[in-house]
Image (cartoon, rainbow, N blue to C red):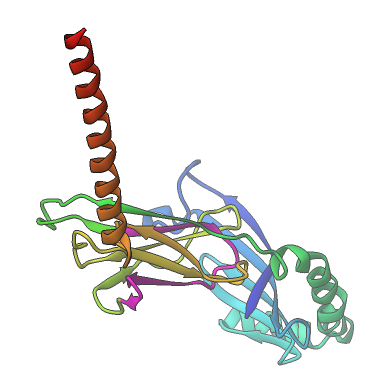
Amino acid sequence: MGLGAAAGALLVALGVLGAPPGAGAELSGVLQFLGTAECHFINGTEKVRFVDTYIYNRQMWAMFDSDVGSYVGFTPYGEKVAKGWNSDPATLEYKRAAVDRYCRPNYEVSRPFITERRVPPSVSISLVPPSSSQPGPGRLLCSVMDFYPAAIQVRWFQGQQELSEHVVATDVVANGDWTYQLLVLLETPPRRGLSYSCQVEHVSLEQPLRRHWGTEMPPDAGRSKMLTGIGGLVLGSVFLALGLGFYVRKKSS
């Protein structure tokens, strides 16, 4: 997995003030110089790569790659500059040392927040009403919000049976605050009397998290309803008998 550690940019605008860079020939007076310094980490700091790139008007013209150990030019001007930099032992030594001087220390500083941070998702189910583009019954939508890291698995169930077909999910979307969100739609309309559940598995959770929608009568629910009805009938009969007795006694007196 690659992690961009830092990026720096310098923008010089000549000509029409406020004109956006790279908008075409009419804005040829706008110049953009961009330099980036990136650290790529594989399996922690087991394999670290430092990449330094130079871009002019959206075209990369030179790059230093620690895996190569020298500068590489991508345009005639870039090749000329790279040749000059490569002829300077001090410059090459400084760039080659960036892996240990720059990347590894920054990894240790960032690791608690980037690699060890865990934010559990907030999960809810809602019924999406039909629309002109999708008429008919509504659809169930599972909203998985504000989780970190991005890797996550979301599954739909009807009762205990997984519904692997007719499930559509968005891409995992970054919120911009180091959390992510994901929407998973069950395209099959829910059936009355059945229960549906959205199950989420994430590294921040000790066990899968389920959210349920709908009602499904448990095996003894019918028996419970019958007993409740019988109890109500018996109590009603008792109160009726007491009321009649009170009425008869009052009338006879």
Between 231 and 168, the one nearer to me in the picture: 231
Question: Height in image: 205 above or below 241?
Answer: below
- Give the dominant element type of the magenta stretch: helix, strand or loop: strand
Q: Residue at x 62, y 67 (%)?
A: 204
Q: Which residue is outermost to the front? A: 253
Task: From the top left corner, tell me how far across and down residue 65 is, in percent.
Answer: 70, 85
Question: Which picture quadrant has residue 66?
Answer: bottom right
Tell me, yes or no, if residue 24 can be seen here: no
Q: Is residue 55 above or below residue 138?
A: below
Across and down, in percent, residue 69 comes to 76, 90
Q: Residue at x 19, y 63 (%)?
A: 191
Position in image of residue 27 (x %, y %): 42, 53
Q: Point out the image quarter for the N terminus.
A: bottom right
**Residue lying furthest bottom in this view?**
68
Q: Is residue 150 magenta?
A: yes
Residue 170: image x %, image y %? Answer: 36, 66
Would residue 108 appear left or right of 20 to someone viewing this image?
A: right
- In this view, the residue in front, 51 or 183, is 183
Q: Quadrant of residue 68?
A: bottom right
Nearer the observer, 126 or 89: 126
- Whether residue 182 appears in magenta in the rendering, the answer is no
Please state, as top left, top right, bottom left or bottom right, where the C terminus lies in the image: top left
Q: Nearer the viewer, residue 157 or 67?
A: 157
Residue drawn at (82%, 76%) of the image? 104
Task: Give the magenta part as a residue range.
Answer: 141-162
